[in-house]
Each structure stands twice: as C-alpha cells, then as structure tokens.
Image (tube, helix red, strand yellow):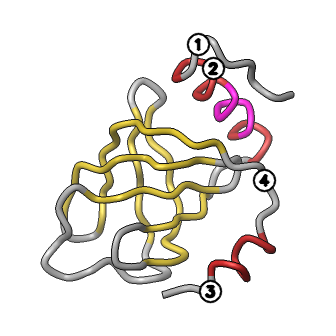
Amino acid sequence: MSDISESSERRQFERYPLMLGALVSLPKGRYDAVLIDISAGGAKFQLKEMPFIAPEIGVSISITIQPFGGFFGDIMWVDDDFIGMKFDENHKAMASLVHEMVAQSRPNTPVPE
C-alpha cells in the first residue's frame, strides 16, 4: 500500500474524476474495470473482479477506454480496492485527451484550460 499524502505531493497533473467503464490488460488476462480518475500522466481504476494473483507494482499494462482507445503504462501502486498506473504516452497529447474525456463525460461542466 502506498502513502497517499506522499503520492499526492508528487502529482504533476490535475486529476479529473470519472466513472467510465474500461478494459485492463494485465500479463495474465483482461479484466473489466471502472476508471475512477485520470490525469495527463496516469489513471486510477478499480477492477470489477480481482485476478487470482494480484497485480504487482512495476508491471506493464494497458487500459482501453471506449471510444478513446488503449493507453499503455506501468502499475505504480496497488491497494485493497484500487490500482494506480502511470502512462507511457506523451503528456501533451494525453492532457488534450483528458480534457476531451471530461467534456464528453460531463457535457454541462466547463473543462478547465
């Protein structure tokens, strides 16, 4: 389990809360998940069903979010309920996509610039 206050101090990008369905590909299978939040640098999600062997920190994974496609990265932390990943993607492109995701998931909410 990670130290939450320490990880929040290291965050470089604004987080956007979301509740979107996703598909997570781990080395031993694919799992339905709920995307809890996303930033230009990573995402927090919850697997709907935990695999037999829990995901490990440092493992490369992908998360597919329709209609946006797949994002690749590494697991940075795991606790009893959630998993945090850091994206391998270009941060500028990811930030643009995050803004688009927020706007589409909340059509009446202005997206911060």
Q: Secondary structure at mark 2?
A: helix
Nearer to us of marks 1 and 4 is 1
Judged by its main secondary structure, the magenta piece is helix
Looking at the figure, which quarter contains the C terminus? top right
Residue 59 to residue 64: above or below: below
Near-viewer residue (29 or 98)? 98
Packing grade of label 4 (10 A; few <14, some 14-19, many >=20) is few
Pointers 1 and 2 in contact (C-beta within 8 Å): yes
Packing grade of label 1 (10 A; few <14, some 14-19, many >=20) is few
Kind of residue at disc 1 = Pro
Kind of residue at disc 4 = Phe
Q: Which residue is mark 4?
A: 13
- Residue sitting at x 34%, y 78%: 80
Pointers 3 and 2 in contact (C-beta within 8 Å): no
Q: Earlier in the sequence, mark 4 or mark 3?
A: 3
Q: Earlier in the sequence, mark 1 or mark 4?
A: 4
* Distance Cα–Cα, label 3 vs label 2: 31 Å
Q: Earlier in the sequence, mark 1 or mark 3?
A: 3
Q: Secondary structure at mark 4?
A: loop
* Distance Cα–Cα, label 1 vs label 3: 34 Å
Kind of residue at disc 2 = Ala
Residue 49 to residue 105: above or below: below
Nearer to us of marks 4 and 3 is 3
**Residue 96 lies in the magenta stretch:** yes
Q: Which residue is mark 1?
A: 107
Q: Which residue is mark 2?
A: 103
> For residue 3, which numbered disc appears in the image?
3
Span of residues in magenta: 95-99
